[in-house]
Amino acid sequence: MVIRIAVCGRLSAEAQKVERFVEDWALERNEPVQIRRFHTGEELLFETELSGAFSVVFLEMDLPGIGGVETAGRLRKNSRQVSIVFYAGEMRDFRELFPLSPVHFMECSINRRQVLERMDKVLKEQRLFYESFRFCYKHHAYQVNLREVLYFASDRRTVNILLETGKEYLMYGKLDEVEQRLKGSNLSFVRIHQSYLVNERYVEEYHHRMVRLKNRDVLPVSRRRKGCVNQLKSGVF
């Protein structure tokens, strides 16, 4: 799947370097990437709200408008999944960034080795701690952290994706296809109904006709899926 990467900075020369070196990394590692450039934190946050979190964000500290630190805080609030790499055009004290951890830093004089090393590190981090679910809707590419998905709900030719944050997304496809994609996941998603695929970690109450989730949503359990609920109760999944 394509790795979505954002480069956000007012220093066009530095941002161009980062973008070029990320492209080099993608070619050398044979990793498909989609790189977007932004000049302000506002632009980046708007796109994140529109199309979901990026996997990696290279972020200049001294942005116009809302600064790099505040932008990073909002990105982290929206998604714990994003890997943030700060860079600066001059020497900086990065101690103010510690509350945003985990983050990565690149000091002045950005070079190819720095960017390739950071990309290797954040990709390893992503694959170790996060599982992304990527999808498309109306020609836009999206990704969400599977750990944040409450459940998938089928609605004719589309599937609703509901997150613990309250956000909802739509994707084209069938729930059977989503279920098949998630079979290799480290998380347990259980088909309780023809129309619902539920993240087991958010199920709070189990009943033979319904389940109640931690966000208080109540979803029906179909007769032919009662065995799945019994397995949930016994901790088989």
Image (spheres, rainbow, N blue to C red):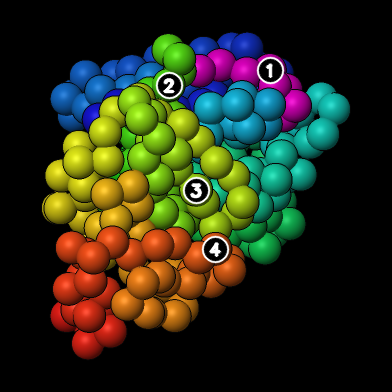
Which mark is nearer the camera, 1 or 4?
4
Tell us which disc is closer to us: 2 or 4. Answer: 4
**Percent x, y for residue 35?**
44, 19
Vertical side of 63 occupied by 24: above or below? above
Q: Give the range drawn in magenta.
A: 36-43
Q: Does the magenta stretch include residue 188?
A: no
Which amino acid type corresponds to the residue marked 3 in the rendered image? Leu
Nearest to N terminus: mark 3 or mark 4: 3
Separation of marks 1 and 4 at Cα, in angstroms? 40 Å
Disc 3 designates what residue? 162
Q: Crowding near pointer 2: few (<14 within 10 Å), some, many (20+)?
A: some
- Residue 215 placed where, x, y %? 58, 66
Which residue: 21% across, 47% down? 179
The residue at the far bottom in this view is 234
- The Cα atoms of the two marked residues, 2 and 4, are separated by 25 Å
SS at circle 2: strand
Residue 199 lies in what quarter of the image?
bottom left
Residue 78 shows in the view? yes
Cα separation, mark 3 vs mark 1, equals 31 Å
Q: Earlier in the sequence, mark 2 or mark 3?
A: 2
Within-10-Å neighbours for mark 4: few <14, some 14–19, many 20+: few
Q: Specify the quadrant that holds the C terminus.
A: bottom left
In the rendered image, residue 38 lying in the magenta stretch gets the answer: yes
Type of the residue with mark 4? Asp
Q: Which of 184 and 27 is in front in this view?
A: 184
